[in-house]
Amino acid sequence: MTTNKIFTILLVVVVFITIVEGKRKKRTTRASPSNFCGSLPSWQELKSALVSSTPPEITTNGGEDFPVWAAIVDEGGYVCTVANSGSSWDQQKLSGRAEAVAKAFTAVSHSVDGFSLSSGNLYSSLLPGGMRYGQAGNTLKPDLVNEGDQRRFGTRLDPFRLQRVGGTTGLAGGLALYRFINGVYRRVGAIGVAGDSNPCADHNVAWRVRKIFGFDGHIDNDDVKGPASPIGTSDALIHDRARPDNGLASSSESGYGHPICSTETYSVAESLFPRAAYIPPAI
């Protein structure tokens, strides 16, 4: 083989490796194109609000009160920040980190300006017979979920940051975030909370944190509407699934129903202002 041929082959190999490496770096470091993270709560603000919304700072959220994860995504679904209520990454259930992102992505991708759907509002519609059955196939990207140093999980340098991780879930704990811009309540992102054994408790935590931030769109005044309007409060959990539950979408009269996780979580949700869950009078 001539020297020129060897040089040509080596050049092609180098170019190929350069292109592949460039694509890999672009995938793993891509910044949010919508650039809305700057207008959303910072990591420190999320961490502080999360700690103040969970025991021992409060009595209970109605579940097991395990330390939890929280994630904020921008309106394009890119992760802005991830935090936890514990003092280190290993105090929370590891599965809750990805679940929190999925809940936030679900809320932001199904809500619009002036109308909010919480992740828990989608529970029934994702079941067999529901209008969104099959959407749960929008799974988290496994290469991102399994990537990175676990010691950075829940820190300012969490590997999820500035990635669109995706995911669709009907478990409670994801809420859209709203800001009043030019006379309209704009959907600017979402928060997801996960880690308690009880998703309704996660929902209660997310409800508290969103209220602290003031990104709830004054849902107590029905400025931002949702499936629970006007009887309930916008994107509150609707507990209208028939009992016994047949596991199908038809168990929910409204189509937006979520099971009552426990009497304790429901009691806490009822005590929050605005209340985070309700049972329609007909049930």
Image (cartoon, rainbow, N blue to C red):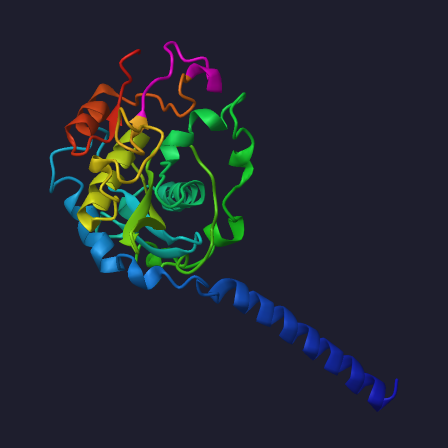
Is any atom of residue 133 visible in this view?
yes
Is any atom of residue 146 visible in this view?
no
Q: Residue drawn 30% across and 40% down?
A: 224
User: Which image quadrant for residue 41?
Assistant: bottom left
In this rendered view, identify the residue nearer to me: 142 or 235. 235
Q: Residue drawn 24% across and 45% down?
A: 210
Residue 92 lies within the magenta run: no
In this rendered view, identify the residue nearer to me: 215 or 29. 215
User: Which image quadrant for residue 261?
Assistant: top left
User: Residue 195, relative to residue 186: is it above or below?
Assistant: above
Q: Which span is picked out in magenta? A: 238-251
Instruction: Give x and y (percent) for residue 181.
Output: 30, 55
Residue 54 vs residue 79: left or right? left
Residue 73 vs residue 129: left or right? left
Instruction: Give x and y (percent) for residue 15.
Output: 69, 78
In this rendered view, identify the residue nearer to me: 242 or 261. 242
Q: Residue drawn 35% across and 21% down?
A: 259
Q: Residue furthest right?
A: 1
User: Residue 217, relative to residue 264: is it above or below?
Assistant: below
In this rendered view, identify the residue nearer to me: 224 or 280. 224
Number of numbered tags placed on the structure image: 0
User: Which image quadrant for residue 103?
Assistant: top left
User: Residue 187, relative to residue 59: is it above or below?
Assistant: below
Instruction: Give x and y (percent) for residue 63.
Output: 23, 29
Residue 80 vs residue 163: left or right? left
Q: Residue drawn 40% across and 16% down?
A: 253
Q: Residue furthest bottom?
A: 3
Q: Residue furthest front?
A: 183
Residue 247 lies within the magenta run: yes
Quadrant placement of the C terminus:
top left
* Predominant SS along the magenta part: loop
